Amino acid sequence: MDKNDKGKSGKAKFAYDGLDRTIHEKARLSILTSLMTHPTGLAFGDLKHLCGLTDGNLSRHVKMLHEAGLVNIQKGYENNRPHTTCQITSSGQKQFLEYVAVLEQVIRDAAPAVKDSKKSPRLTPKPA
């Protein structure tokens, strides 16, 4: 193990504690990214379309994000039809940006390996 494998704080360099499991799940990451780009909120149907989710999946993930304090849900009626709007909270914005900063660190840490892999031929995995 290289002495550089410890971060500045002495912790494991590649632990990435900031990769919050609530955000890290693919559907929830999609929802939060969509809401970050639409800070005034999105109608449930628009969010469903942007994230490629079913009604049930979107509902379940939005509920989890709401319970975590990352998303607000406004339910009401529009033209006598139920209308739900989702909006990222200020805490959700802050946590999302912190999460993205950790992802950026992952990319910086992996960059030398990617650069090296382009110089040398790829190894083919051994058959199982």
Image (cartoon, rainbow, N blue to C red):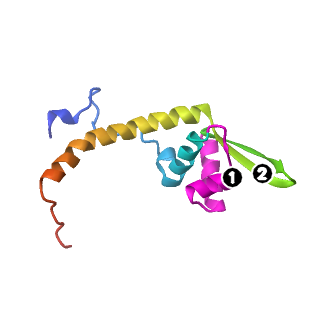
Residue 26 relative to residue 57: left or right: left
* Marker count (numbered): 2
User: What is the C-alpha distance between the residues marked 1 and 2?
Assistant: 8 Å
Q: Which residue is the site of mark 2?
A: 83
Compared with 105, 81 (above or below) is: below
Label 2, residues with CA under 10 Å away: few <14, some 14-19, many ≥20: some
Quarter of the figure that contains the N terminus? top left
Query: Residue at 56% of width from left, 55% of height from top?
Result: 51
Q: Which mark is residue 4?
A: none
Q: Picture coordinates of residue 18 (x, y %)?
A: 41, 37
Query: Residue at 51% of width from left, 35% of height from top?
Result: 95
Could you say which is closer to the camera, residue 33 or residue 11? 33
Q: Residue furthest bottom?
A: 127
Whether residue 4 appears in this view of the structure is yes
Q: Residue furthest right?
A: 80
Could you say which is closer to the camera, residue 67 or residue 120? 120
Magenta-drawn segment: 39-68
Check residue 53 for magenta coloring.
yes
Q: Residue furthest top?
A: 9
Check residue 104 for magenta coloring.
no
Q: Which mark is residue 44?
A: 1
Answer with the quarter of the image where residue 81 lies.
Answer: bottom right
Q: Picture coordinates of residue 122 (x, y %)?
A: 16, 60
| Amino acid found under the numbered disc labelled 1 | Phe
Whether residue 14 appears in this view of the structure is no
Type of secondary structure dominating the magenta stretch: helix
Query: Residue at 29% of width from left, 32% of height from top?
Result: 11
Circles 1 and 2: CB atoms closer than 8 Å: yes
Compared with 126, 60 (above or below) is: above
| Amino acid found under the numbered disc labelled 2 | His
